[in-house]
Amino acid sequence: MKILNILLALMVGVIPILAQDSETEINQEQWSRQAEKIINQSGLTANSATQTAIEKGTSNDLPESIALGSQSDSDTDRPKTRTDEVKFFGDYIIETGEINYAEVRIIGGDLTVYGRIDGQFTVIGGDIFIKPEAVINGRIIAIGGTVHQAPGAVINGKIIETNISKGLSFKETYDESAELKGESKFSLKERSWYSRRSWIHPKTSWFIYNRNEGLLLTPFNFKWDRRSLSNLRLNLTGGWRFSQQTYAGRITLETYLLNRHLILFGSGFRESRTDDFYRLPELENSLAGILGRQDFYDRWDETGFEGGIGFDLNWIRIRVTYVTAYQDSIPVDRGLWTVFRDNRELRDNLSIQPGDVESARISIAFKPRHFDPYRSGIALYATAEQILKTDAYDEFQRLYEFQRILGMGIVGLEISPGVVIRARLMVGTATGTMPEFRHFSVGGLGSISAYPYKTKWNGDPWIGDRFVQLNTEFIFAPEFLDDDWTLILFADAGDAWMSDEYDITNVDSIINNGKSAVGIGFGSSDHDDIDWRINLARPLDGTDYWESTLRINFNF
């Protein structure tokens, strides 16, 4: 079983886990080199700064408590383990009274701690047993095993546990109220990069350009949380809409519980909102506005407050929110400057009736942390919104009370090194009286290529309260082409319609009324992402029309 744990641990990548903290005194690059020695050299002992200092008889790089001889009398009498080592397929025990400040790697064995750890232990494929009398001042990393902590054990340092058998769960243990003695080179300066990010209040792009807000500059993106060590976080985003000469931003207070897996939050905000987030990234949409006087988002303004709860289960995130806000349209800036096509007419907003709205929203996202479009993988997303109260109504005096649900799944399959098939399926449905600007839509960039944006060829809006869309890609990556080029064959299909026309389970009607297109794309890539790409697409309804687009992103 231990051998299986080792293999699984190595398969998912030991190096990224060993390099969780980007700003500790031992940085990511150093840890990567150490991990490669474990895997590739199979037992060669690394010469750490601690070991070198001891061999040279110097103490500059040693923990302060050791270098200055500041231990208590009882500590002086205790055995001290200093040598760094790698141990294969054997258990390791730190006895009662022993102080260990070494850097030790155990592969295929268990670690049992009765004494004190001031250094770092990395255990691959084995379990860790922390006894009641143990004191952990340094760091313990468990890869492919489980940490068993007995009541009474003192954890002043940090424990990182990745358990393959539990779905690669990632857990950090750190007591921010504890005080470390001395300045151990293994002391925690910041939490891991993963823990430092806020997905409740994500960082806003400092530069946004579109037909509604014009130029939106957001120079203020701050967070205060005592270098990510506090369980409270205050986020502030602030910017200026030049077209409306008004501010936009958000302030959020978050508190973290249950080892940062549970988040309680509250926000005050004034910002634009869109349902077209899946079409293309905000930056690419801004470039489309600058270069071609185009905008592939419909958006509206919301000003209000929200509060909720979030669950962060590593690969799965769940967010439940209550929102009370005032909704209104954002006027179209007809004087939007552009490099090319300055005579292109900007489309009008969809009809929006201003009013106060109270709603409950829930979103669920599943995505592996290292999801890569060039590799096999799966990502899922679903969101639902229920309007609880509103004073906005339609022309028939019906209140805009509705329930809106959207689901999306992306699947990638690497059938050969550098050859990947990708697919995205999206399904949407709504009940009740939903305003036009919240309807689902197809057509345009990020939807069905070679068709107008949310518009049929006859000029009618291509929107509805039912929606299905399928996008597929056949990617030949640089790894396959032996160059920095990428070749993509793609096909799109979909439909949006009103529920009184036919049901969402009526596949024949969807196929007969929906539209589709095919295309080819080629571009430059750095093996990790698309640098740029040119798509040529043609509809499959007999229309003699070719559309060319320049992208700086994957189609989805």
Image: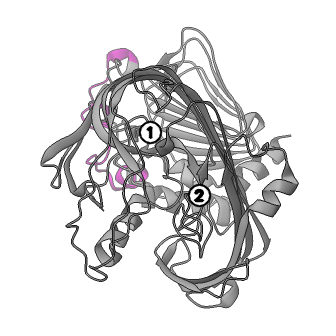
Q: Amino acid at mark 1?
A: Trp
Seen as rendered, the residue at the extreme top is 152
Q: Amino acid at mark 2?
A: Trp
| Colour mapping used in the image | one colour
Give how far across and how far down residue 519 sits, in percent. Answer: 66, 81
* Residue carrying label 2: 462
Seen as rendered, the residue at the extreme left is 245
Give how far across and how far down residue 393 sits, in percent. Answer: 44, 27
| Front residue of this view, candidates 338 and 280 | 338
Looking at the picture, does residue 427 appear above or below residue 532? above
Q: Is residue 322 visible?
A: no
- Residue plotted at (62% across, 53% down): 14
* Residue carrying label 1: 199
Magenta stretch contains residue 128: no
Q: Is residue 33 visible?
A: yes
- Residue plotted at (54% across, 8% down): 152
Give how far across and how far down residue 449 sits, in percent. Answer: 60, 72
Give how far across and how far down residue 517 sits, in percent. Answer: 69, 75
Q: Identify the mark at residue 20; answer none if there is no mark.
A: none
Q: Quadrant of the C terminus?
A: bottom right
Q: Is residue 229 left or right of residue 262?
A: left
| Front residue of this view, candidates 222 and 244 | 244
- Residue plotted at (19% across, 67% down): 335
Q: Secondary structure at mark 1?
A: loop
Mark 2, Cα crowd under 10 Å, few <14 / some 14-19 / many 20+, is: some
